[in-house]
Amino acid sequence: MSLFRPVCTTAALCIAGLFARTAAAEPGFRLETLAPGVHAAVRTDPPGLMVDANCLFIVNDSDVVVVDAPEASTELIASLKRITDKPVRYLVNTHWHDDHVIGNARWREAYPGIQFIAHGTLRDYLPGTGAKNRAGMIDGAPQAAAQMQQLIDQGKNLAGQPISEEERQSYTSDIALVANYMKVVPGTADVLPDLSPSADLVLQRGTRRIEVRRAGRGHTESDLVVWLPQERILASGDLVVWPVPLVGGEQSHVAGWDLALQQLLALQPAMTLPGHGPVQRDDAYLRQLRDLFADIKAKVADARRRGLDLAAARKEITLDDWRRRFAGDSPVRNALFRRYVTGPALQSAWASP
């Protein structure tokens, strides 16, 4: 996570200072029962640059299906065992990022008979690009967190202005999440999927039907969602992220994201557990995301028709109205929108005409 220029002279000093000043991490999530046997572990961190993922427990007649394997998987396993002693039969990774897959090894240790379900692209991504990205995160994140701590101590935000209480809480959370990342991720081996279905997969677990669906590309090439049709509960992975979508200029597919969200809306979910953020109990936020990406795609297509290149399109296309809708007057959310939408969303949409 090379967020900004590090101030420590060595990574070792940054790590030592970070760990010394970070209290023992709390679990960082709360459990919400969405339906009989369906429990969401929802992260309680404030919005920030660092995240860990939500997780879903689906307790069936004789086993459990889990959605996503965050960095907090050790604590999640302990919570699940307080709910049930049934074995976990399947775990679905909704896509390939560390906060959704790094816990696979912990789940396999706890439940040796478990099988992992994910899109087939994980098999190439995790040992290749994923390993390079992880190495960069391990190298850069402690230094970035140390600089955040220095800014807190100076009473400044990332822009060098007086820090608000919202920013202070966000940076403090980021520092704690970096410390946990450095405790969990280095040295943890990847666990690749056992099952990579080429089409939608139905898991009939006793009386409960669980559908693993491919709605389309959006956040990554590997996006999957989990749909419970009887309960009308959707686990969306990072196709849905609150309060600001997480867009990667090189990894995301903005040109198809609105179409994927339209497929999710067609399911008419009563509740959606996003990859990050609170449970959505209506479809208003999903519609807002869909309309954002459709508008970006239309603006980019119009710029192409008028012969602009990407640099010229960046100067002309403004997303300020959307930024105000997503972020309001929150300095943290405005910064997140600029970082994760304004720049990378245009790049992604331009890459897929």
Image (tube, rainbow, N blue to C red):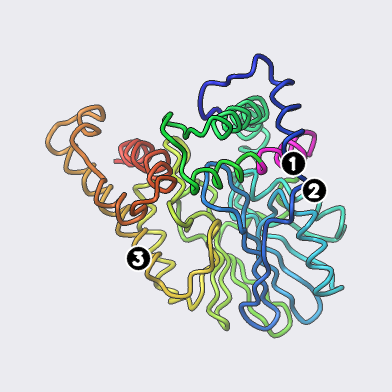
- Quadrant holding the N terminus: top right
> Where is residue 291 drawn, in percent x and y?
30, 59
Is residue 1 at all visible to an observer of this figure? no
Magenta range is 176-189
Q: Name which quarter of the figure residue 59 lies in.
A: bottom right
Three-letter amino acid code at the position of disc 2: Ala
Dot 1 lies on which element? loop
Task: Please name the residue shown 56% across and 65% down the image.
Answer: 235
Between 194 and 114, the residue placed more toward the observer is 114
Counting residues from the start of the chain, the first of labels 1 and 3 encountered is 1
Residues at badges 1 and 3 in contact (C-beta under 8 Å)? no
Q: Residue furthest left?
A: 306
Q: Which residue was labeled with disc 1?
A: 190
**Amino acid type at mark 3:** Arg
- Above or below residue 246? Residue 208 is below
In the depicted view, which residue is nearer to us: 162 or 122?
162
Q: Is residue 4 visible?
A: yes
Find residue 257 and report its horizontal and vertical position in percent: 39, 53
Single out the mark in the foreground, 2 or 3.
3
Tell me the tag on residue 294: none
Quadrant of image for the C terminus:
top left
Q: Using the image, determine if residue 65 lies above or below residue 27.
A: below
| Element on which disc 3 rests | helix
Which residue was labeled with disc 3?
A: 287
Q: Are marks 1 and 2 in contact (CB under 8 Å)?
A: yes
Task: Identify the residue position indicated by label 2 in the image.
Answer: 105
